[in-house]
Image: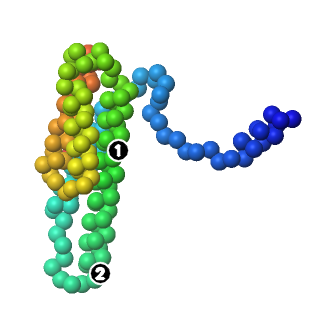
Amino acid sequence: MLRSALSAIFNSLPAPKVKAHCDGPCGVYDPASARIAAEAVLSMTKKLIALEPPQSNDPALWATYNNTFARYVAIKEDQAKETKTELLILWTDYFKPEHLATYPDLHDTFWKASKLCSACKVNIDLAKAEELMKSVEKIHNMFWKSKGRADAWVTAS
């Protein structure tokens, strides 16, 4: 009876949404998702820099400009956050202490890449976005070498 009552209570409560890339031993890791997100950061940064404000005071033109600017910034920030999430998954879940012998700069590489993600969120800085791509490429190479492979670094743009 108590079990039934408790089950009814727990079943009526909303379950919290969770998102995880497996804390189980799935073994499915790939730096490609970090590359795609970092590439989007770079693309949005370039688009923001190239975006020309209207030369007139026309409210409709300014509304369009502001909307486009805000969308580019939102995408850039979202993708910088996604890049950081994907890098942290690789850093904390895939790479193990034994990898430090081969990659003594592993922690520093990931820490700096994570900091670059934050810098790309906060600023519209082409140099930081390009540096983030280089960091993700370095991580890509470390990852595939750790698996005994030499997968090519290929970007979408």
Q: Is residue 129 above or below residue 33?
A: below
Question: Residue at the location (27% across, 18% down)?
Answer: 99
> Does residue 139 appear left or right of residue 9 in this picture?
left
Task: Give the image quarter of residue 112.
Answer: top left
Report x, y in % for residue 119: 22, 49
Q: Is residue 53 above or below residue 139?
A: below
> Does residue 155 appear left or right of residue 34 in this picture?
left
Report x, y in % for residue 39: 24, 45
Q: Earlier in the sequence, mark 2 or mark 1?
A: 2
Q: CA distance from mark 2 to mark 1?
A: 33 Å
Report x, y in % for residue 9: 75, 44
Towards the viewer: 101 or 38: 101
How many numbered discs?
A: 2
Question: Residue at the location (83% across, 35% down)?
Answer: 2
The reply to whether residue 131 is visible in this rendering is yes
Q: Is residue 75 above or below residue 69?
A: above
Q: Which residue is mark 1?
A: 82
Quadrant occupied by the C terminus: top left
Q: Amino acid at mark 2?
A: Ala
Question: Residue at the location (55% across, 45% down)?
Answer: 17
Label 2 sits on a secondary structure element that is helix
